[in-house]
Image (cartoon, grey):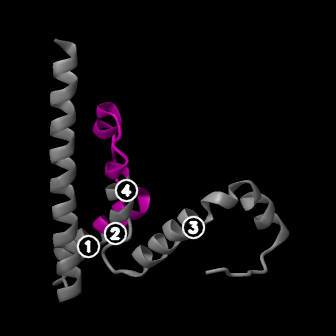
Amino acid sequence: MQITLEIPDDLASQIGSLEDQLPQILQLGLRELHAGAQVGFTGAAEVLEFLAALPSPEEIISLQPSETLQAQINSLLEKNRTQTLTVDEEQTWQQYQYLEHLVRIAKAQALIKLKQRAL
C-alpha cells in the first residue's frame, strides 16, 4: 500500500534519511500511542521494552521507574492509604506489582551473571 502525507518541513528533514525504516517507525509510534491510551499500561511499556532490548546486567541492575511511572505508583499508594481504590485502580496496582516482580527476577538474574563473570 502506498500512502501520501503532507508533513512539516522540519519533520520531513528528520525522516528523510530514515525512509527505509518508516514502516518500523510508524509501527513503534502506533504501539506507543496505543500503550499511552491504556490505563495502567503507561510507563510499564517503557520497562518491558527496556527488558526486551536485552540490556547488559549492569543496565538491568540500575533500572529505575521513570518519573511518570513512579508518579502513578505513588498516586495509587497515597489513594490506597486514604481511600479505597476503584476496581480499575486495583487492577492497575496489580499490574504494577506484577511488573515489579518481573523486574526483580531480571535483576536477580543480572546479579547472578555478574557474579559468574567475577569468578
Rounded to the nearest angstrom, the CA distance separating label 3 from label 2 is 32 Å
Q: Position of residue 112 (x, y in %)?
A: 15, 29
Q: Foreground: 45 or 20? A: 20
- CA–CA distance between discs 1 and 4? 23 Å
User: Which of the two labelled residues, at mark 4 and mark 2, occupies the earlier sequence position?
Assistant: 4
Q: Mark 3 near mark 1, Cβ–Cβ under 8 Å? A: no
Instruction: Judge by depth and name the residue closer to the eye, 82 or 60.
Output: 60
Report the residue that reaches farthest toward the bottom: 87
Q: Residue at x 18, y 83 (%)?
A: 85
- Of marks 3 and 1, which one's residue comes earlier in the chain? 3
Secondary structure at numbered mark 4: helix
Badge 1: few (under 14), some or many (20 or more) residues near its Cα, within 10 Å?
Answer: some
- Write down the residue under mark 4: 49
User: What amino acid is found at the position of numbered circle 1 in the picture?
Assistant: Leu
Q: Earlier in the sequence, mark 4 or mark 3?
A: 3
Residue at the extreme right of the image, as rendered: 9
Q: Which residue is mark 1?
A: 76
Q: Nearer the viewer, mark 3 or mark 1?
A: 3
At x 34%, y 34%, the residue is: 56
Identify the residue under disc 3. 23
